């Protein structure tokens, strides 16, 4: 028997419904643009994953502390491209960056910015990895003096221990440049807007500084957060081999990546050379080289995914003038930092002060203060747990000095081998907080 046919109008309705279902399916599979306020995928982004957003989280993969206004940088780098090279401690499928104008005295305009994976040994990018960065959906961003800007996320396969290229171009004079002077990494400069250049040929000038960039976060499916290390030149790694990533925090990152049972944390190095607990540097607020107390909220508590804090500070309070002569004042400052971390629910591991015997200009009085600070730390009423850098680095035959193999030669800063020993001295169980601190002291 012949089936009755549907009216022509009914076929039109069914066709329209099918088209709607197809559009909805495409939208659901392609996703929307990044985090809230972000932009839709542009031509420089990879296709979006169909995995649900709950399959990962943002965590800090690299950071540095803005340390000062770069000397003699009053006009900034108008008409030049700055290509910063940074080294990641986490892997992820998406990335975003933070730019800082903390020490600027006027708005900083970034006309063009990009992120790419670095090819080995220079300013060139791995082919296919170049991504244009947007800020609220726009390629240009103006950052007020004293403020930061976070880019929209881009899809980029970031490997563990990868070098990334963060490139910025400023079309106009920007005023004093916010920088980190002891990068221990070579970065590059080029004339003109070379932001999207994959090849490195235009980047003929080399620089030992990081400028403007202060953080890289990644979207990771296995990261549990980040450990933030607040420190001085020893954490900054000023005596480590340039370009080799041998700061003690680099060695720590490798342990967290490779050792069974280690927490999967990114390691964020917030060391500033010459930094003190109590006193900042010179200049109006924000002063150059702000103290640990001044910068703790910005450099530690605001980092993405922070789960635990390590503090390595105090030696410059003893060494730099005006010198602190009362160990209790230094430990009181350290306790204030711990209290602020505790208010955020964060565990804090503290380091004893390493030996500096033989350092020019230091004598028995400074050693007395160092020993007093270490005694206060070891008494167990400052931090939640301790990493004893004093024991790890000192010469058993002359405990007031660094072991010669761990001394870079200035009797204060460790060698690469000394930095490795520091990382090995940290009980990773303290970072997880799986044992009471009293059992570790």
Image (tube, grey):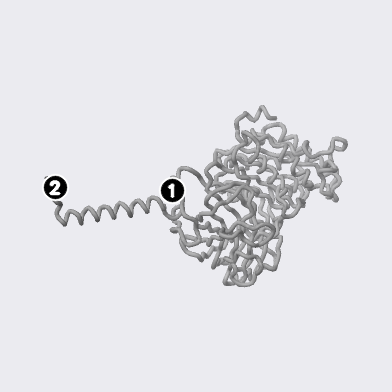
What SS does tag 1 mark? loop
Q: Does residue 398 appear to the left or right of 137 in the view shown?
A: right
Crowdedness near tag 2: few (<14), some (14–19) or many (≥20) residues, C-alpha within 10 Å: few
Percent across and percent down for residue 288 are: 67, 58
- Which quadrant would the C terminus be assigned to in this image? top right
Residue occupying the point 37% across, 53% down: 26
- Which quadrant would the N terminus be assigned to in this image? top left
Q: Does residue 431 appear to the left or right of 46 in the view shown?
A: right
Percent across and percent down for residue 227 are: 61, 42
Q: In terms of sequence position, does the residue under pointer 2 or pointer 1 come before the other?
A: 2
| CA separation in Å, label 2 and label 1 | 42 Å
- The residue pinned by badge 1 equals 50
Discs 2/1, front: 2
Q: Is residue 63 above or below residue 227?
A: below
**Which of 423 and 26 lies nearest the eye of the viewer?**
26
- The residue pinned by badge 2 equals 3
Residue occupying the point 15% across, 52% down: 6
């Amino acid at each position: 028997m012949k089936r009755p046919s549907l009216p022509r109008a009914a076929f039109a309705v069914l066709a329209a419904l099918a088209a709607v279902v197809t559009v909805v399916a495409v939208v659901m599979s392609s996703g929307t643009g990044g985090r809230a306020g972000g932009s839709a995928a542009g031509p420089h982004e990879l296709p979006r994953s169909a995995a649900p957003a709950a399959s990962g989280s943002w965590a800090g993969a690299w950071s540095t502390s803005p340390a000062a206004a770069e000397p003699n940088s009053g006009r900034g780098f108008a008409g030049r491209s700055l290509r910063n090279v940074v080294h990641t401690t986490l892997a992820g499928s998406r990335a975003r960056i933070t730019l800082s104008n903390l020490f600027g005295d006027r708005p900083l305009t970034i006309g063009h910015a990009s992120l790419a994976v670095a090819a080995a040994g220079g300013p060139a990018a791995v082919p296919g990895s170049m991504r244009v960065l947007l800020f609220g959906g726009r390629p240009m961003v103006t950052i007020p003096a004293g403020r930061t800007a976070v880019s929209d996320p881009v899809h980029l396969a970031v490997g563990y221990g990868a070098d990334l290229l963060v490139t910025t171009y400023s079309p106009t004079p920007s005023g004093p440049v916010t920088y980190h002077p002891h990068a221990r990494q070579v970065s590059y400069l080029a004339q003109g807007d070379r932001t999207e250049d994959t090849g490195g040929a235009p980047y003929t000038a080399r620089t030992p500084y990081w400028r403007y960039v202060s953080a890289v976060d990644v979207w990771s499916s296995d990261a549990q957060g980040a450990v933030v290390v607040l420190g001085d030149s020893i954490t900054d790694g000023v005596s480590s081999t340039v370009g080799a990533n041998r700061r003690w925090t680099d060695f720590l990152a490798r342990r967290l990546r490779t050792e069974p049972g280690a927490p999967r944390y990114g390691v964020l190095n917030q060391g500033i050379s010459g930094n003190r607990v109590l006193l900042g540097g010179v200049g109006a607020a924000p002063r150059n080289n702000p103290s640990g107390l001044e910068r703790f909220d910005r450099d530690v508590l605001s980092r993405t995914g922070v789960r635990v804090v390590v503090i390595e500070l105090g030696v410059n309070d003893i060494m730099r003038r005006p010198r602190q002569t009362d160990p209790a004042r230094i430990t009181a400052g350290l306790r204030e930092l711990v209290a602020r971390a505790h208010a955020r629910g964060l565990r804090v591991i503290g380091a004893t002060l390493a030996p500096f015997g033989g350092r020019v200009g230091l004598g028995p009085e400074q050693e007395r203060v160092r020993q007093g600070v270490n005694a206060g730390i070891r008494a167990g009423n400052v931090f939640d747990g301790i990493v004893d850098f004093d024991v790890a680095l000192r010469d058993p035959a002359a405990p007031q000095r660094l072991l010669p193999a761990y001394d870079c030669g200035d009797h204060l800063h460790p060698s690469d081998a000394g930095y490795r020993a520091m990382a090995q001295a940290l009980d990773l169980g303290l970072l997880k907080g799986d044992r009471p601190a009293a059992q570790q002291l």
